[in-house]
Amino acid sequence: MKVSTRAHYGLRAVIAISEMARSGLPVSVSDVAKAENLSDTYLEQLVSKLRRAGILRSYRGARGGYELVRDPDTITVAEVLKAAGEQIIFPECTTPEGCELAHQRGHVCASSHFWQNLNSMVNKIAEETTVGSLIRNYEEEMGEMRAEKRQ
């Protein structure tokens, strides 16, 4: 399994916009791109998808940009990944329909249950993890690191 750059950058963009928009002003794509070291062009494509999915709201004009439509605690990682056009996908053998052995021999292999369980667990975590919880976890870790450096 490999997570695509669309999924990774989409999640990073939503988190960055959430954090940067705390000032109450929309956040420009160029500001997010600079903060996250991403391509403006690529990021513009991603935020357009996120806007169409109802995760981001856009504002036009000189002070335009993006903000979250909803509270970050109500936006899940799974929702962001789906909006970015990605899914968390494990080998096709996670379903009997996609399993080569099931087609050839009439049964799935012994490892298929492992892949099915792993697929379920990862998707469950993505569905239960919110953007807000990721931000809080990060802020707690950064606070702990700063406290350790002061000691």
Image (cartoon, helix red, strand yellow):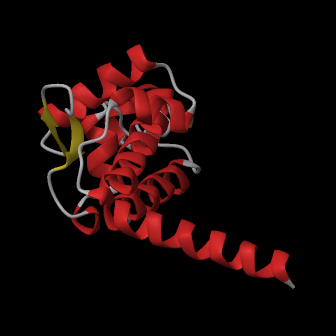
Seen in the picture, residue 81 relative to 116 is either above or below; the reply is above
> Residue at coordinates 46% horizontally, 64% vertically from top-left?
134
Most extreme residue toward the top is 41
Seen in the picture, residue 112 relative to 98 is either above or below; the reply is below
Q: Position of residue 122 (x, y in %)?
A: 46, 57
Can I make out residue 100 in this image?
A: no
> Residue at coordinates 32% horizontally, 21% vertically from top-left?
44
In this view, the residue in front, 89 or 136, is 136
Q: Position of residue 21 (x, y in %)?
A: 30, 52
Q: Position of residue 22 (x, y in %)?
A: 31, 60
Most extreme residue toward the front is 62
Task: Please tell me in which quadrant of the rendered image residue 114 appears.
Answer: bottom right
> Residue at coordinates 20% horizontally, 26% vertically from top-left?
62
Can I make out residue 121 in this image?
A: yes
Q: Quadrant of the N terminus?
A: top right
In this view, the residue in front, 65 or 117, is 65
